[in-house]
Image (cartoon, grey):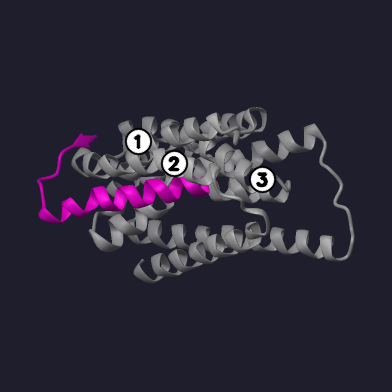
Amino acid sequence: MIFHSSFEYYYLWLPLIGFMIGFIGSLIGGGGGFFFIPVLTLIFHVPAHIAVATSLAATLPIGIVGSLGHYRNDNINIRLGFAFAMAGIAGAISGASLTNLMTTGQLKISFGIYSILMALLMLISSWRTKRAEANGIEIPERSTLQKITRGSFFGFLSGIITGTFGTSGTAPVQAGMFAMRMPIKLVVGTSLMISAVNTFSAMGAHFLVGNIDLTLVFFLTAGTIIGALIGPKFLAGVKIGRAEGPIRLYYALGMVAFGIIMIVSG
């Protein structure tokens, strides 16, 4: 169901928040949906079920605009992204139906647990890679079939997360790509493309089973589109190099922090 909530003066903060999330989402490849849920539920006290569907509608422009920018900068692996995205569509449609089976508290707690588990997976993968490099052990390259199989699994899981929690669902995607030792710029661009596909699929399902507040979407997307345009351009001019490790660490720690907050609030 689509509806318009009555205007509130604090909604004027949403374009600024949308810009920040759009910029960060396109910069790290997360689409921003991961941040929308805590902001809408914890700060603006939007009911979780409405926040999930509304987050998807506000995240879609970030995924589309941001992925186009990354494509221009050669930051997208189309073939691998396709494998993730096709499985993600099925997961997104399935996940949308799960949302209405859960209470607000269950949604928050489940989202928190998911965030912490994905962060731990990213940290473990990064630690194993560092240990192998320190010991001079060369990690064998995965075959094309292994990459497709792994991509399909993480893509389906990503779709489930997108449809259920209204986030971009890129945490499992990025965890899988980091495990494949892909360069961080390629991870960011490709995961954002997958996010756009998953979000579009999940939003279509939520049109039928969810509640989308177009007033919130309007104010949020007024800022997210601008932020999504700037993010890829900023990343293209940055030399990451040795900063890849710290970036992954801070991203994972941020996921843990958000996860704990959501569990406590739930």
Residue 106 sits in which quadrant? bottom left
> Residue 37: where, in percent of width, then height?
36, 54
Secondary element at image label 2: helix
Q: Earlier in the sequence, mark 1 or mark 2?
A: 2
Mark 2 residue type: Gly
For marks 3 and 2, give the CA distance: 21 Å
Q: Residues within 10 Å of mark 1 (few under 14, many from 20)?
A: many
Is there CB contact under 8 Å for labels 1 and 2? yes
Instruction: Tell me the residue at 65%/40% (across/down).
Output: 153
Residue carrying label 3: 177
Q: Residues within 10 Å of mark 2 (few under 14, many from 20)?
A: many
For marks 1 and 2, give the CA distance: 8 Å
Instruction: Tell me the residue at 77%/58% (across/down).
Output: 129
Q: Nearer the viewer, residue 67 or 55?
A: 67
Q: Earlier in the sequence, mark 3 or mark 1?
A: 3
Q: Residues within 10 Å of mark 3 (few under 14, many from 20)?
A: many
User: Magenta segment range?
Assistant: 1-30
Secondary element at image label 1: helix
> Residue 119: where, in percent of width, then height?
58, 61
Magenta span main SS: helix
Secondary element at image label 3: helix
Q: Quadrant of the C terminus?
A: bottom left
Residue carrying label 2: 163
Image depth: mark 3 or mark 2 in front: 3
Image depth: mark 3 or mark 1 in front: 3
Residue carrying label 1: 206
